[in-house]
Image (cartoon, rainbow, N blue to C red):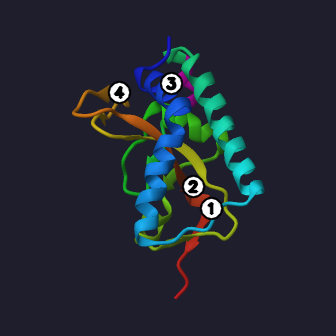
Amino acid sequence: MAAPDLEIALAFLPENDHKRQQTHNTMKTATKKRREATPEQKAAAAERKARLRRIATSIAAMTDEQRQQIAGEGIFTVEGRALSLCNTIMIITQEPRASVVGGFDQWRNAGRQVCKGARALGIWIPVGGGKLTPEGALEAGEGKTHWIVGNIFDISQTEPKSL
């Protein structure tokens, strides 16, 4: 039985991805001109999205006991918040030794910098009207919730800021 948040994520990703990207690009270009991605970059991005979809599909097929066994004690953000069970498993699938994670700016605010060439780990981030409970379930809210892939880094991919 698939977790409710995974079912929602899988339902929204394939058919609405281009719409979200258009909206995202429109918002970005209003303040900063972005260069067009090369065909190689587009192919790499498509491969990454496909890989993350395969991971999410395999997680959705797991039982709750299997998910809990893989997640163990869980993974926490640099700010001390626990990640959802789904995102914890996604991170472990990509980086088995991950322990503390954060986004690029979160690490910078914590006095660390992401190492040059470090590859980001992908997690699902809900965008829209719903909110996640501490257990990782989606609460109903105003508007339609959709999911995007967020990029985070493990502490092993960072180093203290140089002075």
Name above or below for residue 113 compared with residue 78.
Answer: below
Residue 133, image quadrant: top left
Name the outermost residue toward the left: 142
Q: Which residue is mark 2?
A: 154
User: Please, is residue 101 above or below residue 73 in the view?
Assistant: below
Real-space Cα distance between discs 4 and 2?
A: 24 Å
Whether the residues at callouts 4 and 3 have beta carbons within 8 Å, the answer is no
Q: Is residue 72 visible?
A: no
What amino acid is at disc 1?
Gln
| Residue beneath disc 4 | 137
Which of the numbered marks, if any, corresponds to residue 35? none
Mark earlier in primary sequence (4, 1): 4
The answer to whether residue 55 is above or below residue 107 is above
Q: Secondary structure at mark 3?
A: helix
Which label's residue is closer to the chain start, 3 or 1? 3
Identify the element where label 4 is drawn.
loop
> In front: 113, or 74?
113
Residue 34 % position (x, y): 55, 68
Please state which amino acid type lies under the numbered disc 3.
Gln
Residue 81 visible in the displayed image: yes
Checking the image for residue 68, the label placed there is 3
Check disc 1: other Cα within 10 Å, few if <14, some if 14-19, many if 20+: some
Q: Are marks 3 and 1 in contact (CB under 8 Å)?
A: no
Q: Looking at the image, do the residues carrying marks 1 and 2 touch, with CB atoms under 8 Å apart?
A: yes
Q: Which residue is mark 1?
A: 157
User: Mark 2 or mark 4, which is nearer the start of the sequence?
Assistant: 4
